[in-house]
Amino acid sequence: METLFYLLAVTQILTGAYLVWQAVQWLGYVRRRQYADPGFYAPRAAVLCPCKGMEPGLERNLLSLTEFERQNYEVFFVLASEKDPARSVIDRVVKSSRVKTNVVIAGNPVNCGEKVNNLRFVIEQLPEEFEVFVFTDSDGRPGKHWLHHLVAPLADSRVGATTTMRWMIPNSGNLPTVLLAAWNSPIVTMLGEKAQNFCWGGGTAIRRSTFEQSGVLEEWRGSVSDDYSLTRALERTGRSILFVPECLTLSYVETEWEGLLEFTNRQILITRVYAGKMWRSAVLTHFLYCLTLVLGLYLILGDVLAQRPAFHLMTLTFLPLLLSAIRGGLRLTGVAEALPTARAQIMAQASVYVLLPLLMPFLYLVNFMNSLATRKIRWRGMTYELISPQQTRIR
């Protein structure tokens, strides 16, 4: 058993060192992007925000979409029903908005996700004057320069789409909320300068012509995942996705145990159905990490009880944790620099983003096991069964 542990530990240390090097590269990219001139490209843009139900800070989140520094855009809030609880909040935002803001009622979905149905419906109604589609979520709070920085790189016709990622800040100190923020934090470093990037539905911009040429509306037919399906359409047509870290989006979260498991299980099951290769790689990576730690602790305990030296086992068990913490520190540094207005708030909760992620692979394992056991997800009060990337049943 010790031989197995040595092999696992050495593998984890080498992998950890490589990931630290990647994190250094990622931080360098974030810093270069911070000082890059976004340019003057500012086409007519439609900012599309599907909404459903109430959530913490909803009104402030939606107001942020009406406060971007560039005025050449309109906001479209999309609901499935006139009776949605978010409607009253949206009406207040529309009334106070200094840019043109629209409310669109899409109706109930049929064999696809409600969010996907909302987006399909509003895009089919948009006038030709809109050259760029910008997708965002109601639980994010982008900064004033967000829209310009997300859209400007599309001036380069080689860029298929631009995207960013959420950064969760706990609104509460309860354990499920901080675990959710810790669980989410490593995802931001999956995107990078040379990474195989994927679109995030809470912050993606794409030229209308690219959207239509890539057949995204057809890819969305029967889908529950707007962003993974958009990614699949772009990959199929060989178009690149540019990660824009200066557009990282704050998301203030608060949840209980049920909400934590609902969110994390949903994300992992969607990944299994829409990005199987990524899911399999993540399963292997997290399983080996957890196995190494558990086996190391077991052997250390055995040696301590037998009064044998255990320093070498402690060192091999501790080093992967140390490397993971270093990676978390580099990630936190990059995020804090990309979000200067929230830097103090982010750094005040450094332990959530640096130390808690050391144990998050165990929660990921729970999510992986759930994704093997079921094809059903719960999303904003609705239950979906994910048959395939283009086949969804509403339960």
Image (cartoon, rainbow, N blue to C red):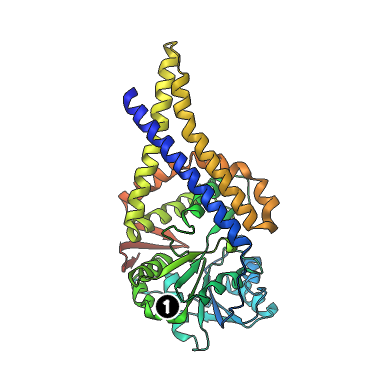
Please name the residue shown 32% across and 55% down the image.
Answer: 277
Please name the residue shown 37% across and 38% down the image.
Answer: 288
Q: Is residue 89 left or right of residue 363?
A: right
- Residue 197 screen position, x and y as percent: 44, 61
Q: Residue furthest bottom?
A: 128
In this picture, is 189 found above or below 156? above
Q: Residues within 10 Å of mark 1 (few under 14, many from 20)?
A: some
Q: Would you name the residue on which mark 1 appears?
A: 211
- Residue 242 screen position, x and y as percent: 48, 66
Task: Give the amino acid type for the residue marked by disc 1 in the picture.
Answer: Phe
The mark total stands at 1
In this picture, is 157 found above or below 10? below
Please name the residue shown 34% across and 30% down the image.
Answer: 7
Location of the C terminus (image quadrant)? bottom left
Question: At numbered mark 1, what does the secondary structure look like: helix, strand or loop?
Answer: helix
Residue 249 visible within the image: no
Front residue (pair 394, 183)? 183
